[in-house]
Amino acid sequence: MDGNAAAGEFAGLLASDPTTVTVRCCSCGATQAFGQLQAYLGGPGTVLRCRECEAMVARVARTPRGTWLDISGSSSWLFPRTPGPV
């Protein structure tokens, strides 16, 4: 699956639609759209991996204690500017 399959899980944590985000892999430096990341669903959490090197870029897991977000496998996330008043 691709990152679009994981968008709903991440959208609840982010203030915008994650499918518009560009993510840079910390391991190989590849830059790709959120929707291009490889998504692994159905385990104890949702995991996103880089399409180039398959390194873990981000993961989210819901537990009884709360929701865990790990983006340590990415070096940056670019949220595009939304049109509107300056």
Image (tube, rainbow, N blue to C red):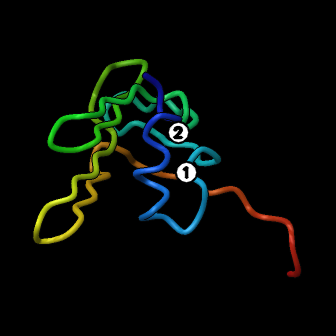
Instruction: State the image coordinates of residue 28 (x, y, percent, origin top left).
Output: 37, 27
In the image: residue 14, left or right of residue 71: right
Q: Give the amino acid at mark 1.
A: Pro
Query: The N terminus appears in which quarter of the rendering?
Result: top left
Q: Residue furthest bottom?
A: 86
The residue indicated by pointer 2 is: 34
Q: Look at the picture and state if 1 lies above or below 80.
A: above
Q: Looking at the image, tell me whether mark 1 or mark 2 is earlier in sequence order.
A: 1
- Residue 68 x %, y %: 22, 61
Circle number at residue 63: none
Rounded to the nearest angstrom, the CA distance separating label 1 from label 2 is 7 Å
Image location (x, y in percent) of residue 14: 48, 64
Relative side of 46 to 18, left or right: left
Specify few, some or many for label 2: CA neighbours under 10 Å numbering under 14, 14-19, or 20 or more. many
Taking 21 as reference, is 36 above or below it? above
Label 1 sits on a secondary structure element that is: helix
Q: Residues within 10 Å of mark 1 (few under 14, many from 20)?
A: many
User: To which quarter of the image does residue 83 belong?
Assistant: bottom right
Using residue 78 as the reference point, say whether residue 55 is left or right of it: left
Please name the residue shown 31% across and 21% down the image: 54
User: Residue at position x 40%, y 36% from top?
Assistant: 25
Residue 19 or residue 43, whichever sits in front: 43
Q: Residue at x 86, y 81 (%)?
A: 86
State the residue lying farthest toward the left.
Answer: 64
Q: Is residue 60 placed above or below 38 in the rendered structure?
A: below
User: Horizontal and vertical percent for residue 17?
Assistant: 60, 55
Q: Secondary structure at mark 2?
A: helix
Q: Nearer the viewer, residue 56 or 59?
A: 59
Residue beneath the point at 49% across and 45% down: 7
Say whether marks 1 and 2 touch (CB < 8 Å): yes
Q: Which mark is residue 18?
A: 1
